[in-house]
Amino acid sequence: MKIKKLIQSAALLSFLTGGGLVANADSPLLQLGENSSAYVFADAGLTWCDNIFYASNGQHKVDDFVYFLAAGVVGDVGKDGSHHLNFSFKETFSNYVDNDDLNSQLANFSVSYSYDPQKKLRLGLFASFTQFAQNDNVLQYDSGSPEYLRDLIRRDQYYVSADINYQISSRVSADIGFNYYNEHFRNHRDVFNDRQTFSIPVSVFYQVTEKHHLGLSYSWSHTEISRTSPYNNYDPGAQDSHFFGISTKGALTSKLTLRGNAGVGFQSFSGRGWLTTEGYYHIPNDAHSTANFTLVLDYSADKYRLALSSGRNFNLGGQAQSYTNTHVRLNATTYLSLHWYLSAYAAYYYQEYSKTAQHKGGDDNLVSAGINLSFLPNRYWRLGAGYTHIRDVSNRIRDFSSNSITLSATLKY
């Protein structure tokens, strides 16, 4: 590792840590009445990663230091009332020490509103906009050109949801929702597909105990997939999926909560085909079903918390590939003392990609784990140090592994 890089990074870390402390001290919480508040915040940090492009070939594996600065605002209005509004905005500047062509400025915005008059009807609304600049070893497989091997994928995500809960009787309630998701790739559009998804979930619950409900659920979603480019003769078509099953939610004990569902999922594609000189070649409808489920267990005690999540669901890759994703993740957090906080996670994802005329199919086994130690001297700011490991073993694309270490100074909110 180059001495120049170490000197630059040490100087940056000293500046970032000091800057973070000053920003935190100068950003007190602003009370806007009894139930409303707002504040601005500033984050700073430094990350070293040994494989910034998720490359598998040793000669293309590149390490670098990335320092980031972020600023934003958070607001909370009507927290204890029947009308509750929450919003946040954050702008993050990421800069690479050696690969400055990868520098990015990314926005993250979200707003949520809930209406709960403590009567039969409850309403929730949510909207968000998020920008990403991320590594992905798909580029390693699809192209050997240097610009693909040494670049990040930049994309924007838009999400809107609405949820309505209605108490039909003393023990029976109904949930209905609407979700809209849009993903837009800003570069490498000859490789990745934009898409937009509409979904409607419906559930009817029966109150089994005072704090636990059991019910029946159905959901439908429709995804429109765009071509990678106007010059590509492959039309990815559209995807429809359905789910039928049983659902459960609520508290099992004073410390343990459970939420999940189990049933059958059905997926089908339409409109996929090739445009040839002889005309349009239609690819037969790719339809199949499988057992689907989601499970979220949350255990909270005085000084620690454990959260287990797992599931098996249909999904779409960035290249319009159909795959079934089975995953399990465990999060653990604990307060070591009044000012020291420790968190860790471990996750495993098994992704089965379907074989089609456009995609060869295959499996990915993705393992990820991380640990983070935080120091919280007061209510306004936090210092942290963390480590993350990611590994993918695949017979679909090339294997890769990545390790990263992060030091940060950030507001606690």
Image: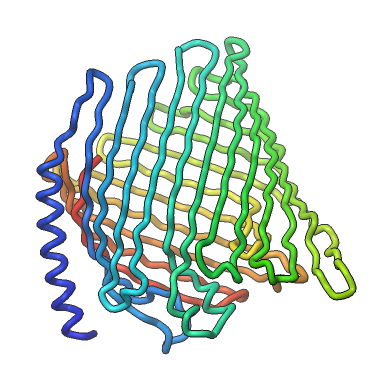
Task: Identify whether 218 is placed above or below 333.
Answer: above
Task: Identify whether 352 is placed above or below 343.
Answer: below
Q: Residue at x 45, y 58 (%)?
A: 347
Horizontal arrangement in the rendering, residue 34 relative to residue 218 (left or right): left
| Residue 297, horizontal then vertical, whole percent | 47, 40
Question: What coloring was used for the rendering?
Answer: rainbow
Q: How many marks?
A: 0
**Rendered-image quadrant of the N terminus:** bottom left
| Residue 324, horizontal then vertical, whole percent | 65, 57
| Residue 158, horizontal then vertical, whole percent | 51, 46
Q: Residue at x 37, y 56 (%)?
A: 106
Nearest the eye: 36 or 409: 36
Outermost residue, right direction?
A: 278
Nearest the eye: 69 or 164: 69
Q: Residue at x 46, y 20 (%)?
A: 115
Horizontal arrangement in the rendering, residue 248 relative to residue 292 (left or right): left
Q: Residue at x 43, y 79 (%)?
A: 150
Snapshot quadrant of residue 12: bottom left
Snapshot quadrant of residue 120: top right
**Rendered-image quadrant of the C terminus:** top left
Task: Identify whether 58 is placed above or below 255.
Answer: below
Nearest the eye: 211 or 146: 146
| Residue 126, horizontal then vertical, whole percent | 48, 34
Snapshot quadrant of residue 321: bottom right
